[in-house]
Image (cartoon, helix red, strand yellow):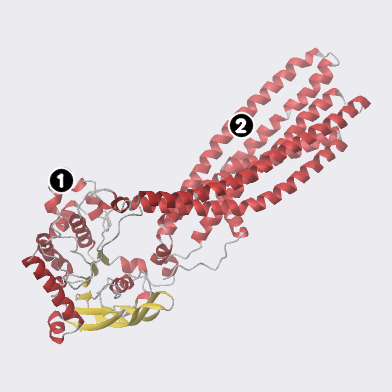
C-alpha cells in the first residue's frame, strides 16, 4: 500500500480545529487556569484605585484614617496576585507537559502504523523531529500561553472601561495608536508564520542528517569523511541560523514598535492629561490612576505580541504534525477487511505480478509461481534481479501494480495485515537487534514466552554456544543495533527469534551470510528444523545452501527466467548452471590457491583514488 493521504486537506482551518480539539480535551485544567487568571487580574486593579484615594483623599484632604486600610488592601491584593500566579503556573504548565507527552505517544503510534513505503520516502530524523520537537509548541495552547492571551484581553478590557470613565477623549486617542499597532502586528505575523513553518522543516532535515551521520559513524571514519560531513551538517545549521535570524528581525521590529507606542501614549497623557488637571476636569489622583491603568491596558496588549508569536509557532508545529497524521495507516486499510478466522496453511501464489517503485520503471514483470504449504522456494539471480522486491511483496510491504498475490487462495490485499504478519517469520541479511538484552531480542515476537522455550530456540539456532560464555548469559546487553555482537552472533539471535515466533510463512534472506563455514554447518540443521512444515522463501547467493529447495526460481531483469529443482536446472543448463559453476570454481580457486587473486588477468582492475577528504 502506498502512503496515501486521507481526503481532508491540511489547511489553517484544519489546524485550528486540531487546536480546538486539544484545548477541549484539557478544558477542565484550562477552566481552572482561567478562574485563577481572573482572580489575579482583578486583584491587580486594587493598586490604581488605591493610588487615586491615597492622593485625593489622604494626601490632599488629609484623611489619615484611610491610609492603613488602603495599604492593607494593596498588600492583600499583591499576595492574591502572587498566589494565583504561582498556582496558575503550576496547574497549567504541568498540564501542558502532559499534553506534550500524550501527543508524542499518539504521533509515534501513528507513525509506526504507516506503510513501509512512507518510510522509504522520509528520513528517520525528520520523523523523529515530528515526534519529539513539533509537539513542544502546544504548551502555548494548553499552557500559560493561551491563558496569558485571554488574561491580557481581560485586563485590557476592564482597564479600558475605567479609562473611558476617567477621560474618554484621551482614551480614544490611546486606542487609535493601539489599533495602528495591531494592524502592523497582523501583517508581521502573517509574514512570520511561514517562516516558523519553514524552521520546523529545516530543523527536521538537519536532525535527520545528524542521525544518519551518527548511525554511519564507522563508515565516516573508514573513508576519513568527517570534514565533508561537517560541511554538509554546517550548511544545514547555517540555513537554520538564517531562518531564526529572519524571525528575530521580525519579532524585534514588533517589540521596538511597542516601545514607540508606549512612548506615544506617554506623550498624550502628559499633554492631554496635564491640561485636564490644570483645567480641573481631572484630579491629581485621577491622572496617577489613569497612568497606571494605561499601563495595565497597553502592557497586556503588547505582551500579546510575544504570546501570538508563540501561538503562531504552536500552530506551525500542529500544521506539520497534521501532515503526518493525515497519511492513512495500514490500520485504516485493515478496517475494510475481515479478520482471519483460522491459522494460515501457507499456500502462496503469484499471478502475473508486475510492480514498480517509480511509475513506468517496473522492477518485477509478469511474475507467476506457486509455493505449496510447507515447501521451500529459493530465489537466485544477479544483483538487481528483483529478489528482495519479491520478498517485500510477500511481506506485504507493497502491493502489486498489476496481477495479484494469493495466500491460501485469498487475495493478500483482502487479508488484514496485522493478522497476516502475525504469522510471518523473518531472518534478514542485515539483522536488526534492539539495544536491550539477548533475552529481549530473542523473545521480541513472543515477549511472554517462558525461559525453557526461549533457551530451546537458542539451542536450535546454536546461539546458546556463545550466550553461555557471556557473564550475564541471556541478560547480556547487545548495544545499539546489536553492535556488541559479531555478525554471526546477531544472525543466530535473529534465527532464534524466528524459531520462537513459530511462523507459517518464513523468509530467509541470506540467513547464513555472516557465518563462517563451521557455524553455517551447525545452523543448517537448525534452519532445516525451522523450515519443516512452514512455507519458506530463501534468498541465497551461496547456491550450495539451497540445493535441497523444493523449487528454485531464477530471476533476471525482474522476470523468472528459469525454475525447477537444483538437479533439473543443472541438467537444463542456462543462467542457474552458469552461476553455480562460476561460484563453485571461485570457491575451488580460493581453497586450492588461497594466496592468489581470483580476478582473471584480463579483468580490468579498479584502483580508487584517495584524497579529497
> How far apart in space, not on screen, are marks 1 and 2 (Cα)?
58 Å
Residue at 53% from the left image edge and 46% from the top image edge: 241
Q: Nearer the viewer, residue 389 or 581?
A: 581
Q: Of discs 1 and 2, which sits in the foreground?
A: 1
Residue 48 occupies quadrant:
top right
The residue where tag 2 is placed is: 84
Query: Image quarter for residue 35?
Result: top right
Mark 2 element type: helix
Query: Where is residue 125 drawn, in percent x and y?
Result: 42, 54
Relative depth, front residue between 576 and 400: 576
The reply, left or right, for residue 66 in relation to residue 572 is right
Q: How many discs mark residues in the rendered view?
A: 2
Can residue 21 be seen? Answer: no
Element type at marker 1? loop
- Label 1 close to label 2 by CB (< 8 Å): no
Residue 567: image location, x then y, percent: 12, 82
Amino acid at each position: 500500500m502506498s502512503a496515501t493521504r486521507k481526503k481532508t486537506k491540511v489547511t489553517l482551518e484544519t489546524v485550528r480545529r486540531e487546536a480546538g480539539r486539544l484545548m477541549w480535551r484539557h478544558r477542565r485544567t484550562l477552566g481552572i487556569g482561567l478562574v485563577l487568571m481572573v482572580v489575579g487580574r482583578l486583584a491587580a486593579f486594587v493598586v490604581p484605585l488605591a493610588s487615586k484615594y491615597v492622593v485625593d483623599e489622604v494626601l490632599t484632604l488629609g484623611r489619615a484614617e484611610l491610609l492603613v486600610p488602603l495599604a492593607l488592601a494593596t498588600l492583600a491584593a499583591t499576595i492574591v496576585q502572587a498566589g494565583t500566579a504561582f498556582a496558575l503556573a503550576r496547574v497549567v504548565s504541568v498540564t501542558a507537559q502532559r499534553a506534550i507527552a500524550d501527543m508524542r505517544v499518539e504521533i509515534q503510534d501513528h507513525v509506526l502504523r504507516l506503510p513501509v513505503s512512507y518510510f522509504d520516502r522520509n528520513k528517520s530524523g525528520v520523523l523523529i523531529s515530528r515526534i519529539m520537537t513539533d509537539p513542544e509548541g502546544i504548551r502555548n495552547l494548553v499552557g500559560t500561553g493561551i491563558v496569558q492571551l485571554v488574561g491580557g484581553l481581560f485586563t485590557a478590557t476592564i482597564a479600558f472601561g475605567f479609562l473611558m470613565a476617567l477621560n474618554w477623549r484621551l482614551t480614544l486617542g490611546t486606542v487609535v495608536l493601539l489599533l495602528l499597532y495591531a494592524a502592523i502586528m497582523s501583517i508581521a505575523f502573517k509574514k512570520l508564520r511561514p517562516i516558523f513553518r519553514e524552521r520546523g522543516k529545516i530543523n527536521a532535515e538537519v536532525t535527520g542528517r545528524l542521525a544518519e551521520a551518527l548511525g554511519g559513524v564507522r563508515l565516516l571514519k573508514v573513508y576519513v569523511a568527517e570534514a565533508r560531513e561537517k560541511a554538509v551538517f554546517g550548511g544545514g545549521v547555517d540555513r537554520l541560523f538564517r531562518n531564526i535570524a529572519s524571525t528575530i528581525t521580525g519579532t524585534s521590529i514588533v517589540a521596538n514598535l511597542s516601545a514607540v507606542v508606549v512612548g506615544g501614549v506617554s506623550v498624550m497623557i502628559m499633554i492631554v492629561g496635564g491640561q485636564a488637571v490644570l483645567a480641573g476636569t481631572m484630579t491629581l489622583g485621577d491622572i496617577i490612576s489613569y497612568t497606571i491603568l494605561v499601563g495595565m491596558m497597553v502592557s497586556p496588549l503588547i505582551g500579546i505580541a510575544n504570546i501570538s508569536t508563540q501561538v503562531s509557532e504552536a500552530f506551525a508545529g500542529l500544521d506539520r504534525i497534521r501532515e503526518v497524521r493525515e497519511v492513512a495507516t495500514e490500520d485504516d486499510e485493515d478496517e475494510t477487511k475481515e479478520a482471519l478466522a483460522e491459522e494460515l496453511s501457507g499456500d502462496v501464489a503469484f499471478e502475473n505480478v508486475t510492480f514498480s517503485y517509480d511509475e513506468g520503471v517496473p522492477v518485477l514483470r509478469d511474475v507467476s509461481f506457486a509455493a505449496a504449504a510447507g515447501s521451500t522456494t529459493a530465489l537466485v539471480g544477479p544483483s538487481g534481479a528483483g529478489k528482495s522486491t519479491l520478498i517485500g511483496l510477500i511481506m506485504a510491504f507493497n502491493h502489486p501494480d498489476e496481477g495479484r498475490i494469493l495466500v491460501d487462495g485469498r487475495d493478500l490485499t483482502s487479508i488484514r495485515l496485522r493478522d497476516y504478519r502475525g504469522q510471518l517469520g523473518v531472518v534478514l541479511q542485515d539483522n536488526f537487534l534492539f539495544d536491550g538484552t539477548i533475552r529481549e531480542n530473542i523473545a521480541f515476537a513472543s515477549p511472554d514466552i517462558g525461559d525453557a522455550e526461549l533457551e530451546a530456540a537458542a539451542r536450535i539456532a546454536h546461539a546458546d554456544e556463545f550466550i553461555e560464555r557471556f557473564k550475564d548469559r541471556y541478560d547480556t546487553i547487545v548495544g545499539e543495533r546489536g553492535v556488541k555482537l559479531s555478525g554471526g552472533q546477531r544472525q543466530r539471535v535473529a534465527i532464534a527469534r524466528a524459531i520462537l515466533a513459530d511462523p507459517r510463512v518464513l523468509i530467509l534472506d541470506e540467513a547464513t551470510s555472516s557465518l563462517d563455514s563451521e557455524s553455517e554447518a551447525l545452523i543448517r540443521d537448525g534452519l532445516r528444523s525451522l523450515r519443516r512444515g512452514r512455507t519458506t522463501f530463501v534468498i541465497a547467493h551461496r547456491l550450495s545452501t539451497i540445493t535441497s529447495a523444493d523449487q528454485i526460481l531464477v530471476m533476471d531483469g525482474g522476470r523468472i527466467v528459469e525454475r525447477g529443482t537444483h538437479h533439473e536446472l543443472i541438467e537444463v543448463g542456462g543462467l542457474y548452471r552458469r552461476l553455480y559453476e562460476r561460484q563453485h570454481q571461485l570457491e575451488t580457486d580460493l581453497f586450492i590457491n588461497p594466496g592468489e587473486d581470483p580476478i582473471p588477468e584480463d579483468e580490468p582492475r579498479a584502483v580508487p583514488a584517495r584524497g579529497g577528504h
